[in-house]
Structures are given as structure tokens and as C-alpha cells.
Image (cartoon, rainbow, N blue to C red):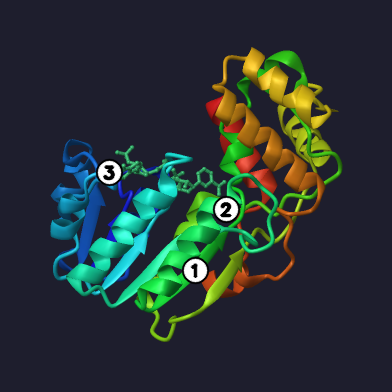
Amino acid sequence: MIAVTGATGHLGRLVIDQLLRKVPATQVVAVVRSPDKARDLAERGVQVRQGDYEKPATLDAAFQGIDSLLLISSNEVGKRLRQHEAAIAAAKKAGVQHITYTSLLHADTSGLSLAPEHLATEKALRASGIPFTLLRNGWYLENYTENLGSALQHGVLLGAAKEGRIAAAARADFAAAAVAVLTTPGQEGKVYELAGDSPFTMAELAAEVSRQSGKPVAYNDLPQDQYEETLRGFGLPGPVAQMLASADAGIARGELDDRSGELRRLIGRATTPLAQAVSVGLKGA
Ligand SMILES: NC(=O)c1ccc[n+]([C@@H]2O[C@H](COP(=O)([O-])OP(=O)(O)OC[C@H]3O[C@@H](n4cnc5c(N)ncnc54)[C@H](OP(=O)(O)O)[C@@H]3O)[C@@H](O)[C@H]2O)c1
């Protein structure tokens, strides 16, 4: 039995979709915070179980009889280490044989403010004694292409990434990597640095948006503190603005770039090109 946490999230849903092409629904368990949001998954024959990282007893029950667990990292930044530790402890109690965890690209050397929670989770996994596999995911292309409306409206993309390259890939590519690991034996102890085939700069992203939309869009690079302040001015909560500006500073240092080709090899195909993601994003803008 394979269980996927965060199964009602963006990545989790893509994982379940792709998993169902490879294994029978009777072998798939969707672990979700709100079963109400997972009715469609139940209709497809997937077992839906409630599992809230904040309620360890629900995790104990959700992981019963599970052989292989995909622990999709929580989106509650700042609370995640405790939440992930709760999930790992429940998996240990339930006798889970293997955990695959969605970590961060180069989590062991990254200066991003997101890195310490991921690295500490990796350490908790190692300490648990449960065989594990790390999917160190790079940035999603969708981070850049799902909200192009305001860039088109104002003719500008803002950031603090300088000329740093971003080896982003689509969520569907990272989902395919997770499914490959979940369905291929011999993954114990492997650490995958997962990133897109064609790293791009923010200026190149702006140029691609201009090319496809026919509207001029420029990249305006700001100092990190000014970018953080601008994001707060747009109404983003302080910690989110800080995290995004810190991530851009990391991009400027090359920390979200990667040329290993591990994602391409793991999924057996090229990763989604930027132009394709921009095209999809522009349709929704
Ligand atoms: N690589 C990147 O660029 C990038 C970008 C954003 C996030 N991430 C990380 O990758 C993860 C997956 O990405 P995503 O796009 O699928 O994010 P997402 O759509 O926000 O999904 C996060 C999932 O975590 C679940 N969750 C949050 N708190 C929980 C709790 N207390 N108990 C149980 N489940 C909980 C959410 O449940 P609900 O469905 O009930 O809300 C949701 O299913 C994120 O959570 C984050 O750690 C990576």
C-alpha cells in the first residue's frame, strides 16, 4: 500500500493522478487534512484517510498498513519541522517500510530561509531508521507562470534574483519523479537533486512573456530589502515577503540552479519547457 500526504494539494493531486496510471486504486491511500476535499479521489477508488500533521493520533490511524509513504512537505512554513517529525514518528509506529520526502534543492548547502526546516526533516528521517528517499525539489515553473496577470497589466516583473538562473520544472514533472520513486524498487538511501533542464533568468522569463503575449514586459531587479518591502506593500504577510526575498537572494547566488539532469533521467523524458508553462499561464491570465 502506498500513501500520499497532502493529497488534496497541487502536487499531491498530480501524484495521485499519475500513480493511478501505474498501480491499482486499491493500493493507493490519500492522506488528507479534510476528507471533504477528497471526494473525487474516493470516487476513483482511492482510500481516503484523514491525517492532520497537527493531530498525531490521526496520523497513527492513517498510516496503518502502509508500506510506502510519500511525505509531501507541509505548506505551513515555520511549523513544518514539528509537523514532519509527527508524521515520521507515526510512520515508525505504524511500521511503514519506506518514506519518500519532498525536500528542497541542495537543502544541505542552500542559504534559502526555507532550507533549515527541510534539512532538519531530512535529519529526522535519517535518525528514524526507516529507509528513505529524498526528492530535493527545485522551484516550480508555476511559481512564475500562474500569476502573469499583473505582469501583463503593469508591463513589469519584479524580483531580486539578479542574473541568477532558476532551474524550475513543472509540478507535473516533480510528481512524475515521485511516482517513479514510489513504483521502482531499490530507492532506499537515494538523494535526488531535481531541477528543470533549461535554467532561465528573470530577464529571460520577462522576454518570453513579452514574446508570447505581444505586450512589453521588463524585469525590474530590486535590492533584496527593497523587494521584501515592496511585497509587504502589496499586502503579503511579513514572513512570506521575507521568504520570497530570501529565495530571490538565493537565486542570485545560484542556489536554485542545477545542471545534474537527475529529474530528466528519473522521469525518462525532458522536463516541461518554460515556453510551454508560459503559454499555459497566459491562457489563465
Ligand atoms: N518547489 C516549489 O517551488 C514549492 C512551492 C511551494 C510549495 N512547495 C512545497 O511543496 C509542497 C507541495 O507543494 P504544493 O504546490 O502541492 O502545495 P499546496 O498546494 O499548498 O499543498 C500543500 C498540502 O499540504 C497540506 N497540509 C498543510 N498543512 C497540513 C496539515 N496540518 N496536515 C496535513 N496536511 C497539511 C495541505 O492540505 P489542504 O489540501 O487541506 O490544504 C495541502 O494538501 C508544499 O506544501 C511546500 O512544502 C514547494
Residue 79 position, x and y percent, is 42, 42
Residue under label 1: 134
Could you tell me which secondary element the residue under label 2 belongs to? helix
Secondary element under disc 3, as helix, strand or loop, is loop
Name the amino acid, label 2.
Pro
Q: Quadrant of residue 8?
A: top left
**Depicted 261 relative to depicted 272: above or below:** below
Residue 267: x %, y % from top left: 52, 70
Distance in Å between CA atoms under marks 2 and 1: 15 Å
Dot 2 surroundings within 10 Å: few (below 14), some, or many (20 or more)?
Answer: some
The residue singled out by tag 3 in the image is 54
Q: Earlier in the sequence, mark 3 or mark 2?
A: 3
Q: Amino acid at mark 1?
A: Leu
Q: Is the C terminus in the top left, top right, bottom left or bottom right quadrant?
A: top right
Task: Identify the secondary structure beneath mark 1.
Answer: strand
Q: Residues within 10 Å of mark 3 (few under 14, many from 20)?
A: some
For the N terminus, the quadrant is bottom left
- Is the residue marked 3 within 8 Å of ligand 1, measured from its CB? yes
Q: Name the residue beneath numbered marker 2.
A: 116
Q: Is residue 35 left or right of residue 232?
A: left
Residue 169 appears in the picture as rendered: yes
Q: Residue furthest bottom?
A: 186
At 58% from the left and 46% from the top, the residue drawn is: 114
Number of numbered labels in the structure image: 3
Q: Is residue 106 left or right of residue 87?
A: right
Provide residue 228's location: percent of width, then percent of height.
70, 25
Whichever of labels 2 and 1 marks the residue nearer the N terminus, that label is 2
